[in-house]
Image: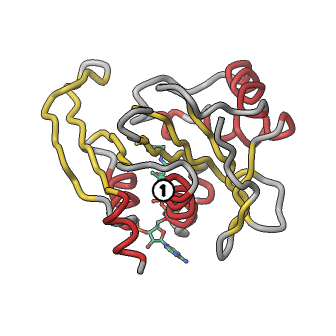
């Protein structure tokens, strides 16, 4: 199992593991239809948030395909969770990691998601040995596409009408960056 060096800080934020005490904050954004709009699943109930917190607060594994690490994002010095950044081990052998982000819209438009995602992407490459970091998103999710682009990820695919979002054919975009590209962009 690989452990991330958490908590860690950025200019404005603290990234840490979730705790059972984060239920109200987690539910505040995970229950919103506007937040779940492009998550390929409905908003979460309070019970589902509580269940997911139990898993998140336990020691997370990073060993097998499908393992994930969900990182809580707070403003430094404050306990309120603004949102989360998720890493998912898509292929252990090929060191492929998927990244995603979900933030409370009450704290949107201030660059917090981008700032947190940059720090988590750095952890993915530096601590987890990721070779390729990618994100999948609905083509209509421009806020998320903007985060990918601010991270320096390249759009690699546009899968036209590749999923059903209710009755709507959804188009999925894939963004990615490689370890050596990430290092070169930062040096
Ligand atoms: C995707 C999501 C995280 C993007 O949120 P966001 O608020 O647009 O992203 P950021 O927090 O990085 O903020 C960026 C904005 O803050 C602005 N900003 C303001 N102050 C800033 C600062 N000090 N530093 C950086 N950016 C700043 C930026 O200009 C940018 O505005 P723009 O989008 O109008 O150009 C959010 O919409 C979300 O959680 N959506 C629901 C869940 C979801 O769909 N997740 C993705 C699944 S693939």
Q: How many marks?
A: 1
Residue at the image position 26 percent from the left and 44 percent from the top: 174
Q: Is residue 117 left or right of residue 47?
A: left
Looking at the rendering, which quadrant does residue 120 occupy? Answer: bottom right
167, above or below 87, in the image: above
User: In x, y percent, where is residue 124?
Assistant: 51, 52
Residue at the image position 38 percent from the left and 65 percent from the top: 182
Residue at the image position 72 percent from the left and 24 percent from the top: 46
- Dividing the image into 4 quarters, which one contains the C terminus? bottom left
Toward the left, the furthest residue is: 160
Name the residue carrying label 1.
125
Q: Rate crowding at label 1 as few (under 14), some (14 to 19) or many (20 or more) other CA atoms within 10 Å.
A: many
User: In x, y percent, where is residue 176?
Assistant: 30, 51
32, above or below 127, in the image: above
- Dividing the image into 4 quarters, which one contains the N terminus? top right
Q: Is residue 108 left or right of residue 183?
A: right
Residues 153 and 22: in front is 153
User: In x, y percent, where is residue 20?
Assistant: 84, 34
User: In x, y percent, where is residue 171?
Assistant: 20, 35
Q: Is residue 56 left or right of residue 40?
A: right
Circle 1: element type: helix
Toward the front, the furthest residue is: 93
Toward the bottom, the furthest residue is: 187
Protein image colouring: secondary structure
Residue at the image position 69 percent from the left and 26 percent from the top: 52
Looking at the rendering, which quadrant does residue 98 occupy? Answer: top left
Residues 60 and 92: in front is 92
């Amino acid at each position: 199992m690989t452990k991330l060096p958490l908590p860690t800080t950025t200019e404005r934020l603290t990234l840490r593991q979730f705790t059972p005490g984060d239920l109200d904050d987690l539910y505040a954004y995970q229950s919103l239809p506007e937040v779940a709009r492009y998550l390929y699943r409905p908003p979460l109930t309070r019970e589902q948030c509580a269940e997911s917190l139990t898993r998140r607060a336990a020691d997370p594994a990073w060993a097998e395909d499908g393992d994930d690490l969900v990182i809580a994002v707070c403003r430094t010095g404050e306990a309120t969770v603004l949102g989360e950044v998720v890493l998912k081990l898509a292929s252990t052998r090929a060191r492929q990691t998927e990244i995603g982000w979900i933030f409370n819209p009450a704290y949107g438009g201030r660059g917090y998601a981008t700032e947190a995602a940059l720090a988590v992407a750095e952890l993915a490459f530096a601590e987890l040995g990721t070779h390729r970091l990618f994100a999948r998103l609905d083509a209509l999710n421009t806020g998320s596409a903007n985060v990918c682009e601010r991270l320096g990820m390249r759009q690699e695919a546009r899968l036209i009408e590749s999923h059903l979002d209710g009755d709507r054919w959804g188009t999925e975009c894939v963004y990615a960056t490689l370890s050596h590209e990430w290092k070169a962009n930062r040096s």
